[in-house]
Image (cartoon, coloured by chain):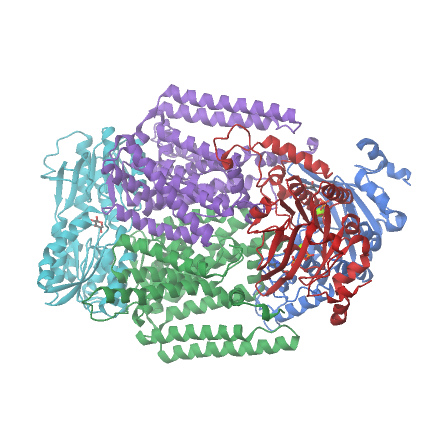
Chain colours: A cyan, B blue, C red, D green, E purple
Amino acid sequence: QDMVALLLPENVNPRWEQQDAAAFVARMKEIAPDVSVEVFNANNDSSVQQRQAEQALTQGARVLVVTPIDGDSSAIIADLAAEEGVPTIAYDRMINSANTKFWVQADMFATGAAQAQHVIDNTADGDTLVMLKGSPTDPNAAVIADGQMSVLQPLFDSGARKLGYENWTPGWDPAIARRSMDQALTQLNNDLQGVVSSNDGNAGAAIEAMEEQGMAGTVPVSGLDCTVQAQQLMLLGKQTQCGWRPLHEMGGAAAEVAVRLMNEQDYSDLATATVTNGVGATVNFVPVDSYSAVGAEGVAYVIENDPSVSRDMVCQGEAAKTDFCAD
Amino acid sequence: MMTASTTTAGHQAPPTAPPTGAGDRAHLRVSGIHKHFGGVHALRGVDFEVARGEVMALVGDNGAGKSTLMKVLAGAHVADAGTFHLDGQQVHVGGPKDAAALGIQIVYQDLALCENLDVAANLSLGAEPVRPGFGFLPRLLRPIDDLRMEVKAKRAIDQLQVRTLKSVRAQVGGLSGGQRQAIAIARAVGADSSVVMLDEPTAALGVAQTRQVLNVVKRLRETGHAVIYISHNMRDIFEVSDRICVLRHGANVATWRTQDTTPDEIVVAMTRGLEKEVGRAG
Amino acid sequence: MMTASTTTAGHQAPPTAPPTGAGDRAHLRVSGIHKHFGGVHALRGVDFEVARGEVMALVGDNGAGKSTLMKVLAGAHVADAGTFHLDGQQVHVGGPKDAAALGIQIVYQDLALCENLDVAANLSLGAEPVRPGFGFLPRLLRPIDDLRMEVKAKRAIDQLQVRTLKSVRAQVGGLSGGQRQAIAIARAVGADSSVVMLDEPTAALGVAQTRQVLNVVKRLRETGHAVIYISHNMRDIFEVSDRICVLRHGANVATWRTQDTTPDEIVVAMTRGLEKEVGRAG
Amino acid sequence: MQDSAFLGMSDRLRILRQSRFGAFAPVLFALAAIWGYFGLALPLWDYLTTPEAQNLRLIFLSPRNIYNLFMQSAVIATLAVGITVVLLLGDIDLSAAATAGVCAALLGVLVLAGLPGWAACVIVIAVGAVMGAAQGMLIAYVGIPSFVVTLAGLLGFQGLMQKILPTGNLNIDDPFLRGISRILVPDMLGLAIAALIVAGMIALSLRRQHRRREAGLEQDSPIAVWGQIAMVATLLFGAVLTLNAYRSVPLLILLLVAITAALGWVTTSTPFGRSIFAVGGNAESARRVGMNVRRIRVAAFAIVGIMAAVGGIFGASRYGSVSYTAFAGGSLLLESIGAAVIGGTSLFGGRGSVWNAILGALVIGSLGNGLDLSGASAADKLMFSGAILLLAVALDAVSRPAGQGR
Amino acid sequence: MQDSAFLGMSDRLRILRQSRFGAFAPVLFALAAIWGYFGLALPLWDYLTTPEAQNLRLIFLSPRNIYNLFMQSAVIATLAVGITVVLLLGDIDLSAAATAGVCAALLGVLVLAGLPGWAACVIVIAVGAVMGAAQGMLIAYVGIPSFVVTLAGLLGFQGLMQKILPTGNLNIDDPFLRGISRILVPDMLGLAIAALIVAGMIALSLRRQHRRREAGLEQDSPIAVWGQIAMVATLLFGAVLTLNAYRSVPLLILLLVAITAALGWVTTSTPFGRSIFAVGGNAESARRVGMNVRRIRVAAFAIVGIMAAVGGIFGASRYGSVSYTAFAGGSLLLESIGAAVIGGTSLFGGRGSVWNAILGALVIGSLGNGLDLSGASAADKLMFSGAILLLAVALDAVSRPAGQGR
Ligand SMILES: Nc1ncnc2c1ncn2[C@@H]1O[C@H](COP(=O)(O)OP(=O)(O)OP(=O)(O)O)[C@@H](O)[C@H]1O
Ligand SMILES: Nc1ncnc2c1ncn2[C@@H]1O[C@H](COP(=O)(O)OP(=O)(O)OP(=O)(O)O)[C@@H](O)[C@H]1O
Ligand SMILES: O[C@@H]1[C@@H](O)[C@H](O)OC[C@H]1O
Ligand SMILES: [Mg+2]
Ligand SMILES: [Mg+2]
């Protein structure tokens, strides 16, 4: 029996297990019902991820779909797989190896820019901003930050906005983001008008810190992923934006590619472009869309377009009392 | 000096002292006690008994099994085989708590103190007095009456005349050998009990303190306690004991009434066993 | 019996034994030793000396400071004040290693054994014999000659007649009190030394073993060692010692030549001090 | 008892350190060193080296930051207090943080299911106790070393937490739960409580001295008694006034102090607490005097379980959410054991105090807090925190009067 | 020595367990239990419950997976062997994994700068020794508890690693370094080495028995002697043949075994090793017999440092890269201490063996490896690994002949 392995990086962000893996497995069932899928999660430990890749290969995996914990050291996974003639698809995060066959991802630079733009749009001249960046080893985090800076840098330079505080968040750990935000508030004595957060986990942590200061809901806060928790905060007006990607399509696309690779079929229709990765290799690129969801309207859009999210899931707890859920 | 019956000694049934001191009068009696430690057979079917109002000395060479027997009686070791009788009733001793409940108190040769606690705490260890008026709490969670504890400790230490030990709040870890031993003795003799066992209690004590301990032993006998006294000091043994039980290589050699024997005879029995043994060992 | 000079005893300078045993002959001499433990002033200006070929007994009540003085001599404690002289030369003892290098060996009252190691290992602890032919390695990394170690241990144990201890490969943690003490003694007397100090070496030993230790002490004297012997047993002390030094409350009371005194006098000096003291303590 | 004439300064210091009050010294010392560094030395350095700096900004010691620091250290402190109890036994608990995570996750699920907040709290505390006690039984009755049992517990509970929280995190909106970290004790009430505590301490000390005199027992030295009271009063009023200067004393801090006080009393003043110290000092001796060593061990692990559950509740309240990383995945485990050990509790058992664990948690919390304020890079922060921790502890070790080492 | 007639089965077992050889028993038992579960029980269960399964797939016990398992456990084992040495002293080292990370990072930077691989290895081993020794000095001479010093080390070294590796990771292409994990010992050479070792053991045992007889010393029981040889031979040939069946014995494994053998010899058969056990058993006794306890402690920490550096080299070679998360950020720390403790080394010192640490590492490695094969969800895997670990260890504890408990 053929097998395909999906290697996830961590369980800090709910998307991996909840959405990406679910979509991947579902699509595999549709298009290749007798191929089994093994899902692994490395809990932010790259040596564990290597072990899981080896175990997948031992079990006879035909394709590896990998979201690496860090972009460079994951090269060995693609290299090991290549030694066995097994192709590797980089999912969401790039693997900097010559043996990376495919990359499935949205335009993260644009996503970062949209986050920053949203915060800019909701602040005024002279306002102070806080940046909560992602995990330093995640290649996406750097791209997102670059996107944000592409919008922010000119304003910082001109003095239209001030950068009050910035920090990276190893492992995208919200607990670390929380402490960063506490420090930002203390250092700025609450005098901040916007939070450019690179994902929802950081946004949630920032909101909680502001909650303690009675500031939650008074400043724009960006995010990424549109988790159920983030959507609830958006309905409550505490988070104001989240970047959304059709994760079901990403998962589905990865499944399509995996099956084509397994059957040695042509895949040129799936990979509409190529990109160059960190080691200069040309990688087939499967782009997906992205959307900047803002406020209740944005929530409505996500519920509409994301099959893994339903209105009932969002309308729970405090959020159930909002107008959005009332109608 | 050896009677006919003693020729059967050694690993077989021991010659007990004359009937007057025998079974029916015994307060605590154990028989057929076996104890292994890995490959070491430390007790090989030992029989032992002690009556109320009697001081039974237990003697034997180093490594004869005296301390092991005491630990078995105190529940610190569980015997591999053997039976316990208290006042003729068979009883079960599965641990130190059982033994304490049966009224057995002991001074261990290695003292069993907690070095991180102070003198007063060690003296009340496991039986801390609690303040009245907290009956609604489980006993273990009632406030310790530390004043009472200290007063009790002070009195006990004074009785043993350890004059250099000035404060009952000193940590035991810093005490001298004799001071520690005094604490262990005070703990055992201070508790309610019917059997008191002392394993080489005066080994580290000075002359005056030793005298006090011997007096305490005599007082315990007078108050109807059954006392077991282990020592290598023949003089002390002949001074306080009523009967002397000799162990050798983990087995009974014999039991004598103190007035019927002499230190030399005991020493010979300890080191060379009885006649038959002498021949063998020779 | 008290001479005029003894009336100055107590916390002041002690009356030393007659000049024949005095300073010039002393092999090891310390003076003015002070030692505090937190608030406890355990040694208060103690003077002490011992000559080669002499057994100096050190006696005193429990907590008098005997063991503390021994530990200071052995480098286990560092004195707060005081001087050391070896053969008239001032020396510095900053730790046990220094003392050992000066030829000082000691049996500690608490034995200082490692329970997790076997008898043979404990007997050679810190001085393991190594196999020849590995000179290219630093000493600490040469292979231990465990056969030699075991043979040595066996011989030492046999000498002390601890017959119940059958294997030198038994872990010390499982040994009886007397067996342990024998090991500690064997370790100290087996090493090369000029001073041997024994702190209550026979406390846990049986009659026969005690005899052997006394013989060993006498042999040490004959071979020109300086021996310090601590005990609470007056009989043993009067049997082996040449001089007796009495400590009380951490200070010298006096030193006697054994032939010039009696056990009773010593006991009185230990417990009540000399005349003046008696008055005070009364 | 002793001739004071002979006592030098260093002896006095040594005696002081041996007193109950003196056991606080090392960790207070470390804390003072760290606060001095972040609060004074660093701003001063900035001020002197950066010519354009307008004024000395003592942010670290500002009431607001102290408030943050207390709140940031609260969860670590709660776990450290529990862990101290098993450390006293000579055991270790690697699973406390994961237990807190499971309890927090369960709490989230229960309130989401509509249970009132207080009922959910009661349930998770009971669950925490059972989780701890179950591990304690394996340690006490089966005889597996606590390191191994709780390592297995760590793995298992991490898994369990993921099972309970399939989405990785969950918002907590329950007003009761959120209230724990949000409700503030009115300024005056805070001061009144502090005054009451100090007055109570004075009354108890006087009564105690009186009764000791009556019983003919040695008196505590007045310096020690009043010194201790003065120290507690200073710390207490200092903390309350500082917190009041920003907002007020948060309920969470009051609860933590109350729980610690209760546990402190149990461990030092009851037969149960005595037996914990006895087992830690010499388990065989404790067994021989008839203590039920096994049951004590199980009870101690149940206490860590309860404290872990409380930590989970505090965390959920403060974070406003339950997430995998905040508990099981993060550094909480090492930080809370570290806090207990920095507080002076020995890993070998028999020595330590739950109060010191709170101070240890403040030491750990101060490192993160202070470095975040300093704006150093992540790498520098880590390196500094190692160095500062070491220095703070070494300062004390070096200042200690020479003894026979450890 | 004793009357064997009196010995029951359980006594014999107990004696066996007390022998040097018997100390392996518990961890071998745990390993066997885990291998039995993953290798036999689980596939059998699948086979019986899944009607469509064609055949029993014993992947776990396949030579290929055993090869993986050895390689996956190698870094943990290397660190665990080092950590065992300080555990024997009664100390702990929380910084070993971070030290390995720093050494690996430095290695990467050095080869990137053009240094030959072997020279870089020599340098990082020296650096590791210095890092360990520095911590040892703080512990031994300043008197700070090892837990605190190495916790500070953990933080500091994590920071240092990030400093050396600003991007978080670095690929390693140096052929010498990669070769350590890639080069395979030819099949025949592997077997020859195994045969040589066994022959050497037999010769030494015979000579020893002979010399003991001559010296009039008690003889080792032939069962124990030959049992030990048989066990070693079985394990050795079993391992070599299995590895040969897939590829061959990797150089890395050979190196690990050789280093462990050297360290095993040092710890059990030299005065230095004896002093480590003595200090762990009773530091005060060791000091009193004139051992230089402080220097021994520093040396032991230097050894952990060296082993950490070796672990870093092994890791860099095997991962083909150096990344922050593989060393400092991950679970390596707990896993390597856990491996040592599961191997039976006491956290209280004085009891344990470096060989057991390797078996402990295999136990830990097998959990991850086996569960990854089982296809369970992440949460289930964690829960299972906790449960299996516990069961494997408990089985031994329960099977142990009744004694006085721990
Ligand atoms: N825990 C143990 N493990 C192994 N062997 C033991 C243990 N306890 C006692 N033994 C052995 O059992 C024998 C009897 O020891 P025990 O302590 O009872 O002797 P004893 O008569 O009290 O001697 P002593 O007069 O020296 O105190 C000794 O050979 C001793 O080595
Ligand atoms: N480490 C220590 N810490 C605190 N006090 C100590 C320490 N060592 C000894 N002492 C105190 O010093 C005094 C002398 O003790 P030492 O052990 O020298 O007495 P000793 O003469 O050997 O008594 P014994 O005959 O009981 O062995 C005692 O009061 C003891 O409590
Ligand atoms: O979706 C995000 C992903 O793109 C990034 O790599 O990791 C964090 C996630 O929130
Ligand atoms: Mg005994
Ligand atoms: Mg003494």
- Residue C217 vs D210, above or below: the answer is above
At which x and y percent is residue E8? 65, 34
Q: Position of residue E223 (x, y in %)?
A: 59, 26
- On the image, the x and y values in percent for residue B247 come to 78, 43
* Residue nearer the viewer, E405 or B248: B248
In the displayed structure image, the side of residue C271 where residue E230 appears, left or right: left
* Residue closer to the observer: E371 or A145: A145
- Asked if residue A305 can be seen in this view, the reply is no
**Horizontal side, residue A208 vs residue C102: left or right:** left
The residue shown at (82%, 43%) is: B267
Q: Is residue D388 above or below residue D217?
A: above
In this picture, is E200 found above or below A95?
above
- Residue E353: tell me if it is visible: yes
Residue at the spot x=11%, y=58% of the render?
Answer: A153
Please identify the quadrant where the N terminus of chain E is shown: top right
| Tally of numbered tags | 0
Work out whether residue D399 or residue A142 is closer to the camera in this orientation and state it. Answer: D399
Residue E87 on image: x %, y %: 48, 45
